Image (cartoon, rainbow, N blue to C red):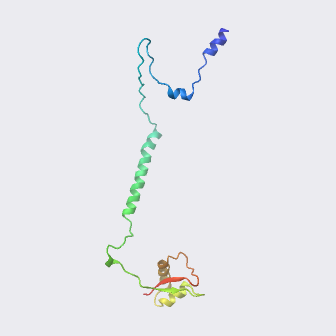
Amino acid sequence: MSAISASQDSRPQLISVQDLTSRQWSAPVPSGSAPTRRRESLPPLRLTRRGRIVLIGIPLVILAAILLSLAGFLNAPAKAADSDADLSVTPTVSVTVQAGQSLWAIAGAVAPERDPRDVIADIAQLNNLSAGGVVPGQQLFVPTK
């Protein structure tokens, strides 16, 4: 009986998580004195090599991304005109596409002295065309010069 009772007494007690969080961890209070709350100081934080890399590396990567995006934004070559006098308006006419017409035929009719490929590129840029196809009845802005 003593062996059974000794083995039962020596088993570790199970403590719930709520007990752990609600317990005050302090040094034992000697009997006869008033209990005082004293918190044990935590040991200093020790980072592993991987922890230092993460702690320093992630902010550095974020800072580099911000700096690169700002540098790209501030050094962008596309810039609007500084004044109204610097703006040039491209003279255009509106053309309705007829059945059987292509951009090549329209470019040849509008500017026969220019290379049709250049005129087609201008028409595509003026009308925000991604493909070279047009449909009958479509209104296009075509450069006149």
Residue drawn 41% across the image and 53% down it = 64
Q: Nearer the viewer, residue 106 or 37?
A: 37
- Of the 4 image quadrants, the one containing the C terminus is bottom left
The answer to whether residue 132 is above or below residue 11 is below
- Of the 4 image quadrants, the one containing the N terminus is top right
Q: Nearer the viewer, residue 144 or 119?
A: 144
The answer to whether residue 65 is above or below residue 110 is above
Work out which residue is located at the far top of the displayed protein and give it: 2
Which picture quadrant has residue 52? top left
The picture places residue 46, in percent across and down from the top left corner, at 43, 34
The picture places residue 85, in percent across and down from the top left corner, at 31, 79
The answer to whether residue 80 is above or below residue 99 is above
Work out which residue is located at the far right of the displayed protein and give it: 1
Number of numbered callouts drawn: 0
Q: Nearer the viewer, residue 84 or 48?
A: 84
Q: Is residue 91 left or right of 10 when viewed as pictured?
A: left
Q: Is residue 41 left or right of 104 when viewed as pictured?
A: left
Residue drawn 41% across the image and 49% down it = 60
The picture places residue 142, in percent across and down from the top left corner, at 47, 84
The picture places residue 71, in percent across and down from the top left corner, at 38, 60
Which picture quadrant has residue 92? bottom left
Residue drawn 38% across the image and 59% down it = 70
The answer to whether residue 109 is above or below residue 66 is below
